[in-house]
Image (tube, rainbow, N blue to C red):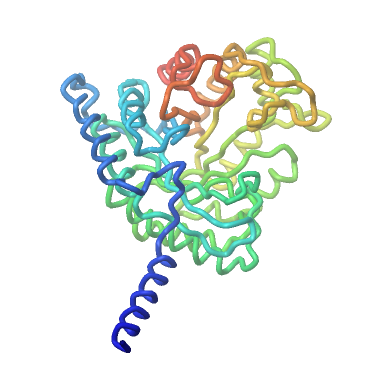
Amino acid sequence: MRYRITITAILIIILVFTLISVKFNDTRFLTQSSYIKSSQVIWDRIEQTKISLPDSLIKKAKFEGYFKGISFYPAPLPYNSEEAGFSLTELLKLPEVNAVEIRFFLYQYNLYSTNLLYDTHQEYILQEIIGKIHHYGKMVCLEPQIFIKTPEQFVANIKPHNVAMWFTSYKRIIDHYAKFANENNVELFSIANENASLWQYEEQWNEIINSVREQYNGRITVKLNCWWQEESFKKILRYDWLSNKNLDYIGFSPYFDLTSQKASSIEELIRAWTDSRYNRHGLNIEKELEVISQKFQKKILFLEIGYRTIKNCTIEPWNSAEVVPQGSRHKVEFSEKESVLAIKALNKVFKKKSWFAGIFWFYWGTTKSPPRDTSWNIRGKDSIMKQIREGFKEK
């Protein structure tokens, strides 16, 4: 009897430690049950398209210093869904695109947590996706994304109770995926994604960058946030870790509030990049980005930028709500016209800048956009994709 109790106790202890050590699995993006089986189905389906590819699309992409990228984002279905496999194939057949951005996912309980979790199962499908992207001759950008239990708790506001513990946990995961990226020949790796409340920790970010360089041979970047106050721009200029010699690019998600009302012309939107809606005289965003590039001697990347297909899409391009702008009574209305103008304007402003290294448009969904869709999903929106592809051709 005592023997059985001892065995039971040991099994319980093993189970507890297993549960503690298991990495978090966000079912919105990964389905752990029958995971390997489902991902193999996707891979098999994608493999069937190989025979129909022109030789020009199978050759390894030659990097010429400019990223013509699209973000392949697991929405509304996860990366390992059958539909995602077909969607990825469709994206990879676009000859103008030379890079695809994908994400690995981390989790923390709330804004004040000091421990981050992750699910190693995601690496099965990520490895297959990376292999497929390379097979089509495209480059890969791999970046982290932290999910917090309460959706309205944005990662830019993370304030861990113990900063040192948070960075220890975060660095462990980033080191793991830097090694994963290196093993899979990933061309561009981002060390962080919009963690604005944590950028001031110089020592910790330098340590992360240097550690990543020790185990990763590709190009290293980071995704900073956009800003609407002059002080936020000045803060960035004080982050000396951005001059770290092991950091290759400074990335941004430039969802800048360009206009305060409907943009009626391409000229108006081009002008908005040097005189945006904020402050008495507006912000000269173009110039401020150039100043950042010059100070830290790094080229600028737009690691995530897109416009919802709605009227007034440049007022608050970051806003996902049904009312735009915030505090108004203006419910969003479907329109692709202004989004097309915004894409065209961005290309015209930045494509010839010597300090600019490219764009990743957000986002190519795992399913086509439904009719009159007002999200950022560009898949299935012909006028949007036409403008993006034309912009890539011009560079």
Residue 351 picture location, percent across and down? 50, 24
394 relative to 343 in the view: left or right = left
Q: Quadrant of the C terminus?
A: top left
| Image point (30%, 83%), residue name | 4
Residue lying at the far left of the rendered structure: 51
| Image point (49%, 12%), residue name | 383
Image height of 261 relative to 297, above or below: above
Residue lying at the far right of the rendered structure: 280
| Image point (61%, 13%), residue name | 335
Residue lying at the far bottom of the rendered structure: 2
Q: Quadrant of the N terminus?
A: bottom left
Residue 143 picture location, percent across and down? 44, 45
282 relative to 363 in the view: left or right = right
Q: Nearer the viewer, residue 269 or 322?
A: 322
Q: Is residue 217 visible?
A: no
Image height of 301 relative to 22, above or below: above
Image height of 333 relative to 316, above or below: above
Residue 370 picture location, percent across and down? 49, 18
The total of numbered circles placed on residues is: 0
| Image point (21%, 21%), residue name | 53
Residue 290 picture location, percent across and down? 60, 36
Q: Is residue 156 visible?
A: yes
